[in-house]
Image (cartoon, rainbow, N blue to C red):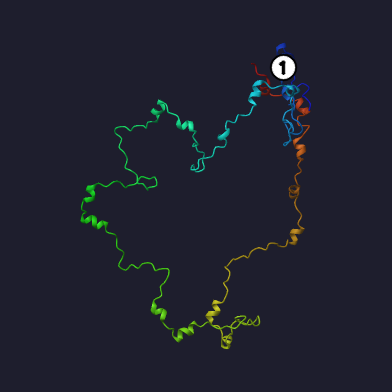
Amino acid sequence: MTAVQGPLFTDSGGGGDETSTNEQATMLQRVYQLASPKTSRSVWLTNYEPKLIWGNQDHMWPLSPTALKASASPRLERLALSKRNFQTGRKICRPEFSYSCGRASLIWEVSPLAMTAESTERVRVLAHPKKPPPEYQKDRPENEFSCGRVSPIWTVADGAKRCPSRDRSDQLARAKTPHQHYTGNKEVETLVPRPAQLAVATPRVEDLARPKSRPAGLFLDPGHPEQSIWKVNGKARTVSATQRLLELSKPKGLADGFVNNREVAWPVSRSARRNQPTERLGQLSIPIIRATMDHVQFDPDAFLVKETAKKARCSQRVEELAQPLVR
């Protein structure tokens, strides 16, 4: 990499005062500073950090000899001490409450001194339950077997128990009767009546109940492959089909304009094989040759300035942008 050298601007006038010369020199120095390439502080390729190998005991950054020889202060030594374990004796690994459904419970064994101790006056005051306001109305008692939900069962007054029911209440309290043609479900186990158990089967029933006798081996003789499985009657062999059967036996024809599927592989015609490609096709068939990634990522001539760019004149806008900020 080389820095930009040589003049970038030429004085077209016949002369100038000292002020314009100093401004031009300052501007040229600024342009040279902006045109110089940035110095790379990276290591090999694109690694901007020291090479680390995981799994060893090496430090990420090198330690100075003074840091290795330094001694810790009393504050660091006190902070490095491990936390004290207060669970000693019976308090080590307190068991969880047996009815806590798997979560840690705050219930543990109470010492005998705590059980015989007397509470203070303040603790007795805090132990008193909160009194409800005067306007508070107690809820109806929940059912004992309601599984925690509010039950509609409550105490019935004696007057309601001795009150005679009306005809309409008796009618509504009467259970709904099934339909007159209703038949209940049949039992899974069918009971055979006694007369059916003592009945004697007729000769026809015994004949039907006798299993069919079949010879051992194949059910049918396969015979020759060209023969039919079942025996065909001689008249059926010589019969002629009717006009209707012949019409129904005709296969379904294809529609007009039907084109069959194209073959997967088809031969190339002789004219196509003897055809010569045009010049344009030859240009398009040339493969694109690209530079390798090593040359693309690492180009030593990336910051070289061309000779024509050194002799070029910048525009008025570029001169205005190249001037340093005045702070």
Left or right: 215 in relation to 146: right
Find residue 315 and report its image quarter. top right
User: In the rendered view of the protein, which quadrant contains the C terminus?
Assistant: top right
Most foreground residue, 112 or 56: 112
As drawn, 303 above or below 229: above
Residue 322 visible in the shown view: yes
Regarding residue 17, the answer to whether it shows in the image is: no
**Label 1 sits on residue:** 26
Residue 122 appears at what percent x and percent y? Answer: 41, 26
**Mark 1 is on which residue type?**
Thr
Name the secondary structure under disc 1.
helix
Q: Report whether 170 appears left or right of 112.
A: left
The residue sitting at 23% across, 49% down in the picture is: 160
> Does 231 sit above or below residue 27?
below
Which quarter of the figure is the N terminus placed in?
A: top right
Q: Position of residue 152 (x, y in %)?
A: 32, 47
- 157 above or below 308? below
Position of residue 154 measured from the top left corner of the image (x, y, whole percent) = 30, 46
Q: Residues within 10 Å of mark 1 (few under 14, many from 20)?
A: some
From this viewpoint, which residue is outermost toward the top?
A: 18
